[in-house]
Every structure is written in structure tokens, then in C-alpha cells.
Image: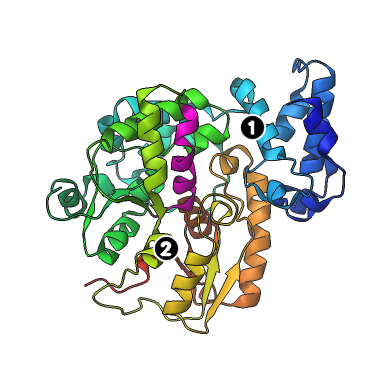
Amino acid sequence: MGNEDQAKCVRCGACLSVCPVYEVTAHERFSPRGKQDLLGWLLSRGGRLAGCQGLLETLKACLQCHACSAVCPAGVRVDDLVWQVRRQTTSHTGLPWWLRGSFRAAASMPGVSSAMMKLPGSSGLLNRVLGLAAQGLDLGEMPEIAPVPALLADDIRSLAGDRERGAVGALFVGCVQNYMFPNVVRGMARWFNNRVFVPSGQVCCGLSAFSSGDVDLARSLAETNLMAFADTRTDFILTGCASCASMIKKWPLLFEPGDPMRERAEDAARKVVEFTEAVVRFHVVPEKIELLHPGPALLHLPCHQRYDACSREAPLALMEGLYPGMVSMLGECCGHGGAFSLGNPRLSSLIFQKRMEAVREIRPRVLFTTCSGCLLQWRSRLPRDPDMPVVIHPAEALVAD
């Protein structure tokens, strides 16, 4: 961060109108403009963070949703400035130790991670292993861990073992879909008539680590994935999560020019495509179209779909094709933000309450979202109420054969 960044801000307040954290706190220091001022103050004291606990807490209260940068008329990227400071202060603003340890284990021993996730979700043992129970976090009514992770399920593993049957795309599963929502993976494969290849050994995309400033951990996770996808020989990499797509497009930033991994990362960044965008771009039409849930429908558009590297139009086009005249769109952050919901559970809950108020007004029968984190947020926090919609991923829209 330099003086030129500080001087760009004209204090117009445009960022205040789109910041989810400011929306629920109405406190200037939690706004992008307020964070900009705090970063300027930090610069004036030579970047010294000693005794700046309040500043660190404020910087943790950023979803990295990119909304402020998208609307800033002066081109100030406060989210990037916050990220730069997080990178320098990972020990204070990074991932919780228990989550960092889980990711490191996955990066170095993906098989061990998958085996651990076979523990029954209802036993509570998994939460104790991960340290979740000890954190006292308000995460809502968390969905059950899948009895069998997607990457260990026989029907999905069969897609990983046959590279010669004309697969057109390689499927990046991501951690939330792997361990909690494997039916999303099955749905994506079904849409593409099982002509996808699912590489084994893949792990988390690294977005939570990257957003918290832990570049070393993000790089380690990216390397593990790049090795898993090294010999896929397919036209594109399909993912059911807009946030994963966004992170995969950032993988080249993790490697220096000349690093052999940089070229692999650039190839993956060129090939990755979010599910709804792939369906629309490649004119994918399943053999059987029968809707699992009737309309009206509400599409929640994730932040990474709106502001970062993915098509905003594709999810709406797909949903309007399935539910003609019955689709509304909700374009505000749900408050999950990956590690944000773990480090700021109260703020995450307050932001979600705002979105739930909109759902009560729209009264949809089914709610779709294209991000694994958003899917987790909606499914865990939406009340179990007959008036509330069923929450699913677009890949789950059709009745399975």
C-alpha cells in the first residue's frame, strides 16, 4: 500500500451502499472507506502493527466480496489493500489454527483427509477432531457430513477411472461439495451425461487460505490440485462453485514466473468454468428434463459470480429457461465468506438475517445458488419452516433417473 492509494479515495461513500458489513453495523470503521482511513493511519506510522489490535479486528471484518471495488469511481481496491495487510499479519488475521491444520493435512495427505471425513457426521466426533465444538461458533443448524464423500463414492469414483470414454471436461469437486453435498457432484455429472472425468487426489481450492493472506498454504493446496489434474487431457475444468472458479483463476498468482507450476496453473485458469456458465456456453441439454421442485424460484447470485471472473448472466439464463416467468434474483452477499463466517459468526448471522427478510417477501418455493459456501449458509441458517424454500444447487434442479 502506498500514498497514491490513500490519495485516490474521494470519500464519496459509494462503497458504503454495497458493503454487507457496514449494512449491519452502520459503523464507519467497518466500512471500506473507514478501512481505507485506518490503512492510511497504519501507513503514517510506518506499517507498525504493535498495539493495533483494534485495527486487526476491523481488517478481519471484511468478506473480500469485491463489491466496494466494483462500485468505486476512483478505482480504489480496498479489498486488495486489506488482503495485503492480512498477508503480512497472517498469525493475527489468518485462518483458525484448527482449520489451517486441516487444510495442511489435506494438501500433504489428501487420502488421510478423505478417510477422516468418512466418520459419521451425526456422531459429533468429526466436529471434535476439527476443533469446531471447542470454538463455540454460531454456525446455524449445520448439514450432516455426507456418509461417503463424493471422491470416495463408487458412482463418482467410476468417473475418475476411465479417461478414454470421451470425457469432455474434468470436474473440480471442492471441499464443501465433497464432504457435505455430493449430490451436487452427481447432478453436474448427470447434466453432462457422465462425460466428465473426476481426478482423484484433489483437495480444497485454497480460497479461504488465500483470502486470509496465507499464500503459502494456498500455494500448497494449488500444487496438490495441479498434480491431480496434470493428465486430464480435457477441454475444460468444470466446477459447481463460483468461488472455486474464482480461486482457480488466481492460481497463477501463487507461483513465480519460470516456476513449472506457473504454466500448469495458467492452463487450469484458462480452462476452468462454473457449472451454469458451462451449460449455457456449451448448449448442454440433458436427455431428460423434469424439475425436482416446482417454482416460483429465487436465484441468489454469489459475490464471486457477480464481481469476479464468472458470468453473471449464465445462472439467470439457465434458471429462466427452467422456470419461465417464475425467477426472481437476490444479488446481495449472504454473509458466509468462507472463513469470515468462522471468525465473525455474529456479523455473518446479521448479514444473513437481511437476506432472509428478502426471502420472506419474495416467498419462493425453491432457492438456487451457485457457490458452495452460499449453499452451506442458506441450508444451515434458513429456518426449518414450511413457508421457507428448498435450497439447492442448479445442478440438482432435475429429477434423477
The outermost residue toward the right is 11
Give the amino acid at mark 1: Trp
Residue 52 location, quadrant:
top right
Question: Which quadrant of the rendered structure holds the N terminus?
Answer: top right
Question: Where is residue 323 drawn, in percent x and y?
Answer: 46, 80
Relative to 65, say whether 109 is above or below: above
Q: Which residue is mark 1?
A: 83
Amino acid type at circle 2 is: Thr
Contact between labelled residues 1 and 2, with CB atoms less than 8 Å apart: no
Residue at coordinates 70% horizontally, 40% vertically from top-left?
77
| 13 to the left or right of 268 | right
Does 73 sit above or below residue 46? below
Q: Please state the extent of the stretch shown in magenta in the rendering.
A: 240-254
Residue that appears at 56% across and 35% down = 211
Residue 203 location (% of width, % of height): 34, 37
Quadrant of the drawing holding the C terminus: bottom left
Vertical arrangement, residue 314 with respect to residue 292, above or below: above
For disc 2, the marked residue is: 276
Task: Give whichever of 39, 109 is nearer the camera.
Answer: 39
Please provide percent x and percent y for residue 153.
Answer: 21, 50
Residue at figure coordinates x 66%, y 59% from the top left: 353
